[in-house]
Amino acid sequence: MTFSLSTGRLRCQLSHESSLRLSQLELPDVRWIEADSSPLFGIVANGAYLGARDEAMIVVDAQFIDEAYARRCITHLRHAPSGLDIWHHLVVYEAEVVEAWFEARNTGDAPVLVSRLDSIALDLMPAACEVLYYTAAWGSEFGGIRRPLQSAFVLETRAGRSSNQHHPWFALFRAGGGILSMSVAWSGNWAFRFEPRQDGGWRISGGLSDWGFSATLGPGDAIASPPVILVLAAGDDLNDISIPYTRAGRCCWYPRNALARQLPVEWNHWWSYEDKAIDEGTFRANVDVAAEMGIEVCTLDAGWFGPSDPGSHWYDHRGDWSLVNRARFPSGIRALADYVHAKELKFGLWCEIEGLGQLAQVKPELAARRDGERLGYLCLGNPAAQAWAFETLSRMVEDYALDWVKLDFNLDPGAGCNATGHGHGAGDGLYAHYRGYYHLLAQLRERYPEVVWENCSSGGLRLDLGMLRHTHFTFLSDPDWPEHSLQVFWGATTMFAPDALLRWTYSEWINGYAPQTFNPRDPSLQPHELDYFIRIGMLGAMGLSQKLPELPAWVRARYAAHIALYRSSVRRFVREADLYRLTEQPKRDGGGDRWAAFQYALPATDEHLLFVFRLPGSMPQRTVRLRALRPDRDYALRWLLDERSEQRSGEQLTRAGILFDGLRERDSALLSIQPHQAWA
């Protein structure tokens, strides 16, 4: 029995005889996966590594499901020696994206110790390869590294947050053409292993990290591996990998409600009024200006909770959500929400629901512990902790009339909790925590379907396709100085849709951090520089953190003009279009490409939007060649917010490109490109 999961150009087949076999996974003329020999998945049970090719692994039954946007095969396997039954899931989406994971259940009479979960394991044919991956830390996310794959290599995170140390993604480039990319949809520790084979090929396996992990499955107990996403491309253009990720995410993974689909412009007080500098009067004054500028959401970040002390520090009181700092907010939070709503804006609030605060003393049994020591966060592997978090967030949403909740997490759990009595074992506390957090988020979205839930973790340190299945937006990084923002956006869009990525324009920080030097009141600030800063923030979901009442009149007017443009013209592309990175990754501190160009393309209407940025240290001119245009069609080009337009053919725009030779350093261009009226 063979099931074809093929869609579009991607050919995928599973054979079910006495065993499960991947008989085909390839693109036309691009075959580099040794399908027949691939283990397909892997699980270490009682010290033995088991995969689909294990001689004792037999097929019980298989189910093929043809869905609206995908084809799915669920194969029930049995491994009698270990007592495990395994349900292997393989999904191929119309976007030509593959997803794989499995569930294992102990159907025997004795406990089974599970110590590794590889959601995918594939053998590659011999070929010279280069691997691209991203390093990550606070303020230095998406550090792109591309190097030859020459020896055994493990790409992983052990910090307990998915994108601290590395981002859960890679792309493998084969000499002569072809790209294979994978991403783990998991918010904790994960791993990809690249192991050389004797024939010169490679075995790639990935899923949950086995560092510090083990789970004892008693009779009847089950465990699931995190999904791993796979994308193949025929050539060497990374856009051919990122566009399928984006399309699959939009159609099948990302939750969306009316407010999230709107892609509203958000103001957040944080960097300009960090913690102690925010109070009720200051927030209201900013709301007044935000309404005039066209901003649609106003978010109160940290600083609102804890004891009623003007000098209290937010970090010391994370978890004390029942306390409102009345010294700063004498009228309370609901009065502030009502004020925002009276301006016909949406109201958002920051919360670190995993933080402990006084809960560590009131309910010490809910705290995550390792070897008896508190780890500083709530163990959501504990059903009682999940219930407390759900009740607490529900009360906040209802009592404060919240439209938007920013959920942060500001510590590294490492291997996680090993306390007994939490509903998990000594080796799977971190695993249980993230399963519990996902469950909590699903409950909240079900109860409050119109509330937007934003993911944040010290900026961008818990950024993955697992979290983006449970939250509407993810915050990309705390710092937002221009070069950093361009580097991060370029890297993030290799795996995420731009409309899921919230960025603020270049913020004014009241506390010191060397690169964050923006001062909107600087008399030397030029209009073209301000446009450059703002437009970088318009590439995804747009936000800003500024002292709005203190903006000079011309700066405020320029912000308002861009916000109006974003709302009327730009966000439709961000929300719906394919994104092409037309230049290489720009990098912080003068590295990488010193020009950055991004093209949004709407295939259905053949409309396009082009952002071009000239960074410091760049050559004075650059030719940018566009993609996805019809060579036989004429296009009207219009420089937005500038008095300039022209007409060119699709062939000219793709072959010769557009020469940008009039931009200064820290300058930008924003172009609308649409079919000329004669071709409409």
Image (cartoon, rainbow, N blue to C red):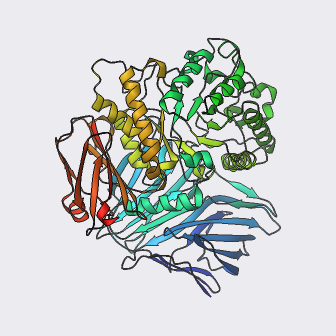
Q: In the rendered image, which quarter contains the C terminus?
A: bottom left
State whether residue 493 is above or below residue 654: above
Q: Position of residue 388 (x, y in %)?
A: 79, 37
Q: In this rendering, would 563 be left or right of 675?
A: right
Residue displayed at 70% across by 75% down: 76
Q: Eyeballing the image, is 407 above or below 227?
A: above
Q: Tell me if residue 462 can be seen.
A: no
Q: Is residue 123 above or below residue 663?
A: below
Q: Return the x and y of residue 405 as percentages of the image width and height.
A: 64, 37
Q: Quadrant of residue 550?
A: top left
Q: Quadrant of residue 251?
A: bottom right
Please say whether residue 526 is visible from this viewpoint.
Answer: yes
Residue 510: x, y in percent? 46, 19
Residue appearing at x 66%, y 46% in the figure: 430
Q: Which residue shows up at 75% across the image and 24% down it?
A: 358
Residue 90 relative to residue 308: left or right: left
